[in-house]
Amino acid sequence: MFKKVLVANRGEIALRVIRACQELGVKTVAVYSEADASAPHVREADEAVLVGPPPSNQSYLVGERLIEVAKRVGAEAIHPGYGFLSERAWFARAVREAGLVFIGPPAEAIEAMGSKTAARQLAIAAGVPVVPGNAEGVKDADEAIAIAEAYGFPVLLKAAAGGGGKGMRVVRQRAELADALASARREALNAFGDDAVYVEKYIEGPRHVEIQVLADQHGNVLHLGERECSVQRRHQKMIEEAPSVAVTPDLRARMGATAVAAAKAAGYVNAGTCEFLLDRDGQYYFLEMNTRIQVEHPVTELVMGIDLVQWQIRVAAGEVLPFDQRDLVPRGWAIECRITSEDPSNGFLPSTGRVEYLHLPSGPGVRWDGGIEAGSDVGLHYDPMLAKLIVHAPTRPLAIARMRRALHELTIDGIETSRSFHLRVMDDPEFQSGDISIQWLEQRLGSLTAPTTDRETLTLAAIAAALVAHEERTAGRVAPAVENLSGSAAMRAEVPSGWAAHARREGLRTS
């Protein structure tokens, strides 16, 4: 086992890796930008090194500097987390050439799966089903039109080097294709430095289901079941769960075997994820492989009882996986909500400021993977994800009820967050029934983010007014007339639970 690991990331994933190392008896080195000097991950690590100013391209993305720091402090390995340099083959290779261990897959596997077109070609060669389409970037609009007409509209244009919905366009008729291709190419070039775009058949109403794989250096490749990731906005996942209501044990075994075959074809080692589209007829199609730990890995950990981050480290240190496929059976249900610094009632615009107060949920089956604390400053330099709230329960209905209860307990004052949006999803009948697809959220977004004036909100607004009056009285002043709160923050869906929590702390009843 390693004696010291450098964690080349920030926020909640840096803390997650640090905690895994602590339990393994491994010393950790945090890196931080000037904006993160007081961040929790800096304090929790055994050592911390400043690597640059706030912009990530001057700090967390400067791979040469991170490697130099690792060697200077005596770290034997680097864990990249997710995002930043985690899927950069050149960085994995540079770490290896520096005599250090990259806690992730080999650079060659990252290269093999890093391009969507290359991954498609590899999958096809391995007999893995893919969405019908071409396997290389198109030369021009005429070629794209020919491919689209061969498969039939609608089609999906996708950036070969992309992810997160960048360089992606749905085209429903021939006349739209040329402009959509030009737009997708521009966006792909800006986002990834590569304007290659390919064409595939657009699958109407599919689910996004992914399979977690884990492979050691001794030829053992296993899958750890599926995650349902269909609740997406602009191709960004917002809520994930394991298992999926649409996956039977037989389908799980078949999709798992397909993911293992894809991983073996790429010479994969360590943790990775194969993403699939699952249509309403039970047919599934390989999309891509994420060559890193996923944001949503906790739901798999909870239903499988396996610490994936610890096994990333153990595998990188040369250990053999001690379990086989028969041991890996999901137990119970887990749901994860991504808590972001965005305002759902205002088009999910980013919110910045200081976390003035933070009250975390607790109780049976509740897990908080967070990178903030009271006093944390939230800016625009990095991804808006603040934390992940995860619950585990014996059944899906109980997991939904547990998540609802945990979200009601969560209070983050000082910035707007996605908390209210998640509460509404938990209350949505279609979500509760599991009748969702990757288009579901876009179709329901208006009702899930609209301002509300329901009975609970009005009750809680009254509590807010009562608290203001009470504080005025106890301060020895005459309470001013309480203004109409209908247009104030207290009337907005994401705030009242904070008032409810405050009211409970003051000993007042909320119903």
Image: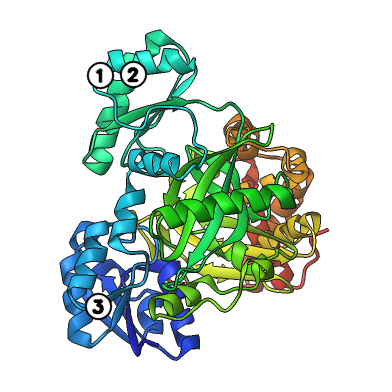
Q: Nearer the viewer, residue 351 or 74?
A: 74
The answer to whether 363 appears left or right of 451 in the picture is right
The answer to whether residue 87 is seen in the rendering is no
Q: Nearer the viewer, residue 146 or 73?
A: 146
Q: Which residue is mark 3?
A: 100
* Residue 64 x/y as whole percent: 16, 68
| Residue at the spot 39% in from the left edge and 44% down from the top edge | 122
Q: How many marks?
A: 3
| Residue at the spot 79% in from the left edge and 60% down from the top edge | 510
In what element is the residue under mark 3?
loop
91 lies above or below 154 = below
Q: Nearer the viewer, residue 372 or 47?
A: 47
Res 169 → quadrant: top left
The answer to whether 44 appears left or right of 37 in the picture is right
What amino acid is labelled 1 in the image? Asp
Kindly check if marks 1 and 2 are in contact, taking CB atoms under 8 A apart as contact.
Answer: yes
Q: Which residue is mark 2?
A: 144
The answer to whether 315 appears left or right of 36 in the picture is right
Kindly check if marks 3 and 2 are in contact, taking CB atoms under 8 A apart as contact.
Answer: no
Quarter of the image with the C terminus is bottom right
